[in-house]
Image (cartoon, rainbow, N blue to C red):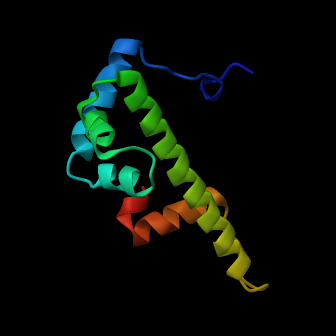
Amino acid sequence: MYGEDHFVMMLAPTHRNGCVQSICSWLEDSEWTSVLENAQVTSPGTADSFLKASPVTTTRRTHQVTAYTLYRLLSKAYCQYKDVLRYDEVILEFEEWCLELSKQSPQIE
């Protein structure tokens, strides 16, 4: 009932803002803004402002949407993986499948 698996750790707002700025610096050369523009999520100017973390709340929300979208795509790929298996093949659990996938493609981690 009271184990470490029952707690959620959250950073204070100043730490979260620092994390957002760190993420923005990592994304600077990643073409992330192009993805947002091509997906028509935002305009080029707004996408560039996300990298500067000028509107911190908006930037944080955009990162959350990005993470959610990537998770959804991963979940969809897992469902497709299960659909193409033959009846005699072992179905890996989602976490195991992700680990196997990350061995083949380091970008999955």
- Quadrant location of the N terminus? top right
Residue depicted at 34% across the width and 18% down the height: 15
Q: Is 8 in front, or is 81?
A: 81
Where 20 sits versus 47, above or below?
Answer: above
Residue depicted at 42% across the width and 55% down the height: 109
Residue depicted at 66% across the width and 72% down the height: 80
Pinpoint residue 97: horizontal percent, then vertical percent: 58, 65
Q: Is 6 in front, or is 108?
A: 108
Residue depicted at 67% across the width and 61% down the height: 93
Relative to residue 108, is residue 97 drawn left or right? right
Residue farthest to the right, as pictured:
87
State the image quarter where residue 11 is shown: top left
Q: Is 98 in front, or is 49?
A: 49
Where 76 sits versus 19, above or below?
Answer: below
Q: How many marks?
A: 0
Pinpoint residue 39: horizontal percent, then vertical percent: 45, 55
Where 20 sits versus 65, above or below?
Answer: above
Relative to residue 103, is residue 82 drawn left or right? right
Where 34 sits versus 52, above or below?
Answer: below
Pinpoint residue 6: horizontal percent, then vertical percent: 66, 25
Relative to residue 109, is residue 55 drawn left or right? left
